[in-house]
Image (tube, rainbow, N blue to C red):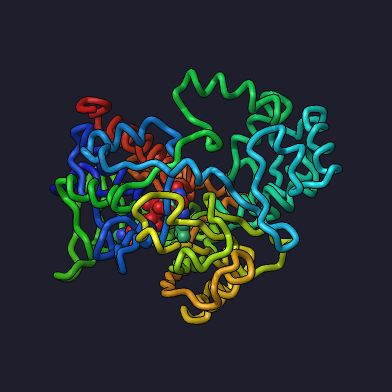
Amino acid sequence: MLNRNVDVIVIGGGISGLAAAWALQRRGVSVMLLEAAARAGGTIGSAREQDCLFEAGPNSTLETTPLIGSLLDELGIIGERIYANPEARNRYILRNSRLIALPLSPFAFFSTPLFSAGAKLRLLREPFVSRGAADAEESVAAFVRRRLGSELLDYAINPFVAGVYAGDPETLSVRAAFPRLHELEQKYGSLIRGQVLGARERARNLEQSKHSAAMLSFKRGMQTLPDAIASRLARVELNAEAVAVAPENGGFTVTASGANGPHDLHAHAVVLATPAAAAAKLVAPFAPQAAGALAAIPYPPVAVAISGYRRSAIAHALDGFGFLVPQRERRQILGTIFSSTLFDQRAPPEVALLTTFIGGMRQPDLAQLEPDEIADIAQAELAALLGAPAHAEFVRVTRWPRAIPQYTLGHLDRIAQIERAERDIPGLFFCANYRGGIALGDCIKSADRVAHEAATLLGGGERAA
Ligand SMILES: Cc1cc2nc3c(=O)[nH]c(=O)nc-3n(C[C@H](O)[C@H](O)[C@H](O)COP(=O)(O)OP(=O)(O)OC[C@H]3O[C@@H](n4cnc5c(N)ncnc54)[C@H](O)[C@@H]3O)c2cc1C
């Protein structure tokens, strides 16, 4: 091949690309990361203003895999990690315009006013509902209706899906979006039985279920993680958008458009760690089917409104993680995180900091309104639901035009197309949140897997790991 610059070029400096580049570098592979924006981190974005910490993207993540702790250790930032306050355990769900805490124990479940007696009895029948077909692709809504009944869909799963994916359970594929649920049904014949028996298995693998994993952030916010990785990578180019990728002579030429105009870089392997639409454009000339599959992954818009109030002016105790809004309640927001309760040092003690999510698959138009209009919606809803004053002290709005990939029906076929391209074109890898899960821990796991595969292909394997 042409004189190569590095072994691997990673395109995209969100957590997926950063973690993949880091995992390659520590395996002794020479790697260069290209990031189109002026800073690394992608969707992660923390800023401190007015003595408050604003998180425009993820506020926290769950420590579902030991890889997160190892990564923080390697980067020397384990001391920066903080865990959620114990009082943030409560999660509220809106029902009949009232916030009701989600029950945290079986006893609380049977006494909660959140679900009717009929819905509770229906849950007891779950272990006796027969298995769905192993290879059928079913929506999350159909799966939940079949196993748990429609009230649990409306008042537990629908708001949960809005909180995680900004998604719609009617369009998400249960096997793709919640593979664990599908697995529990297939393996144990019941979610309840599987939850109990599966816990023993996870304990053996040192993995944590999303239900029991600790929630973490950093003293200075989530941006600590991408900053730490970017500063330890030997070769990072910011403001460098990859505009073309061409497989040639057993390797790849990547054309990057930077401050000094376009330039070509050569490598044995390429990791595409951009959102799906950007990856689709780059591979369209030589992997049109994978490009078509990537381009078909929907990403709805989400707006994030972070508002600050005098704590004493809000009627609600804010004693929890926050609240989620079921679609049936017909409100204009998906939910709100009580950010100043969740972690210490997010705001001065007299300030309540609230992070409200708007739009998603449910109401995409709202996320595209002008920032002032989005701020008005957030304030009006927080006044109605939390007893907050009509006007916040400040509101800061971020709009993500293409926020979160949706693992909709057909997603597994799309991923199969992407895997086919990886098999057909050795050295081509795809690693981003449209595959293997959207949470940061999932992205870190996927990045580690891709780094292992790329290092093995290059003959390095685990040599420096
Ligand atoms: C509002 C919001 C809240 C969230 N909350 C949580 C949460 O609480 N907990 C959690 O775990 N997860 C959360 N997530 C999900 C999580 O943040 C994302 O799944 C994850 O950060 C995605 O990382 P990524 O690297 O795959 O993609 P991105 O972060 O999208 O990174 C892709 C990068 O590629 C770059 N790029 C694109 N095209 C090119 C190109 N041609 N050349 C070079 N670079 C390019 C982009 O500039 C970007 O930096 C949230 C997401 C959103 C939007």
User: Which residue reaches farthest front?
Assistant: 312
Locate residue 144, reporting x and y percent: 73, 43
Tally of numbered discs: 0
In the image, 380: left or right of 94? left
Locate residue 373, reporting x and y percent: 52, 81
Which quadrant is home to the N terminus? top left
For image coordinates 63% across by 21% down, the residue present is: 197
Locate residue 18, reporting x and y percent: 29, 47
User: Which residue reaches farthest right?
Assistant: 118
The answer to which image quadrant residue 429 occupies is top left
For image coordinates 63% across by 38% down, the residue present is: 104
For image coordinates 31% across by 43% down, the residue present is: 19
Q: Nearer the viewer, residue 294 or 209?
A: 209
Locate residue 95, reporting x and y percent: 72, 57
For image coordinates 32% across by 41% down, the residue present is: 81
Considering only vertical position in the picture, is 130 above or below 159?
Answer: above
Considering only vertical position in the picture, is 301 above or below 349?
Answer: below
Considering only vertical position in the picture, is 135 above or below 373?
Answer: above
Can residue 12 be seen at all in this image of the molecule? no
In the image, 85: left or right of 152? left
Can residue 103 be seen at all in this image of the molecule? yes
Q: Nearer the viewer, residue 207 or 385?
A: 385
Which quadrant is home to the C terminus? top left
Write down which quadrant ligand 1 falls in. bottom left
Q: Nearer the viewer, residue 359 or 325?
A: 325
Q: Nearer the viewer, residue 108 or 423?
A: 108
